[in-house]
Image: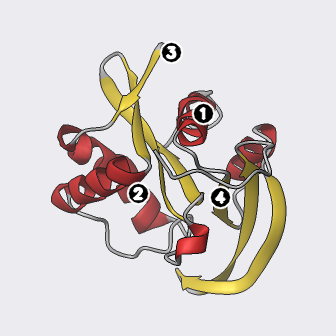
């Protein structure tokens, strides 16, 4: 597999929506219950790209996954923290594509002034937990029975990664 990681554009919305769709319909990995349309995905891409980042992974010129960051929470004191997610075509997990996406996303966020990346993982999801652990994300808690989907309650584990070791006061975000 020869991957190219690049910034997403609105032209990638259809492919990103197609990657995400089976997670929405067939799993509890995401708590969304209706797959977003390509138009809705284009809005998400634009919003994340404007403030954080949205990347796609291409294999032989075809989008096979994406990773993005968005605000962790709305209040101003949280503005140096972000939530990150990665989604790959089914069958592409544990191929290195998620690591490759985060390998570009996390340094990009650090360069833009973000200090902490947070990942939320619906349980069970060993591949996601393993990826985040391999990248240095540390568990900070679990929300028990926080989401109801497909006839069952699901827990969500929260992990975080310091994007910098600095404890100095933050500068404005770039």
Residues at circles 3 and 4 in contact by the CB criterion of under 8 Å: no
Q: Can residue 89 be seen in this snapshot?
A: no
Residue 31: give its label.
none
- Measured from the top left, where is residue 60 in percent x and y? 35, 15
| Badge 1 or badge 3: first in the primary sequence | 3
Cα distance, mark 1 to mark 3? Answer: 23 Å
Find the distance from the CA under tag 2 to the CA under tag 1: 29 Å
Q: CA distance from mark 3 to mark 4?
A: 26 Å
Mark carried by residue 1:
3
Q: Earlier in the sequence, mark 2 or mark 3?
A: 3
The location of residue 6, given as percent across then percent down, is 38, 27
Q: Earlier in the sequence, mark 3 or mark 4?
A: 3
- Report the mark closest to the observer, 3 or 4: 4
Q: Residues within 10 Å of mark 1 (few under 14, many from 20)?
A: some
Viewer-side label of 2, 4: 4
Which residue is under mark 4? 119
Mark 1 and 3 residues: CB-CB less than 8 Å, in contact?
no
**Residue visible at 74% across and 68% down in the picture:** 157
The residue labelled by disc 2 is 22
Callout 4 secondary element = strand
Q: Is residue 158 above or below residue 148?
A: above
- Mark 2 secondary-structure assignment: helix
Q: Residue at x 56, y 36 (%)?
A: 111
Side of 150 where 160 appears, left or right: right
Report the residue marked by disc 1: 107
Give the spatial CA distance, label 2 vs label 4: 20 Å
Q: Is residue 7 left or right of residue 80?
A: left
Which image quarter holds the C terminus?
Answer: top left
């Amino acid at each position: 597999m020869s991957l190219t990681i690049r910034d997403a554009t609105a032209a990638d919305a259809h492919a990103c929506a197609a990657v995400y769709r089976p997670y929405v319909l067939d799993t509890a990995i995401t708590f969304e219950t209706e797959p977003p349309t390509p138009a809705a995905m284009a809005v998400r891409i634009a919003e994340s790209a404007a403030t954080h980042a949205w990347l796609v992974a291409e294999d032989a010129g075809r989008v096979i996954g994406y990773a993005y960051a968005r605000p962790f929470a709305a209040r101003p004191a949280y503005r140096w923290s972000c939530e990150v997610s990665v989604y790959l075509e089914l069958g592409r997990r544990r191929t290195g594509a998620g690591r490759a996406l985060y390998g570009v996303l996390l340094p990009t966020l650090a360069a833009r002034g973000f200090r902490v990346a947070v990942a939320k993982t619906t349980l069970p999801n060993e591949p996601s937990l393993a990826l985040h652990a391999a990248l240095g994300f540390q568990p900070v808690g679990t929300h028990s029975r926080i989401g109801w989907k497909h006839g069952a309650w699901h827990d969500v584990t929260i992990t975080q990664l310091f994007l910098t070791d600095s404890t100095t006061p933050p500068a404005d975000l770039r």
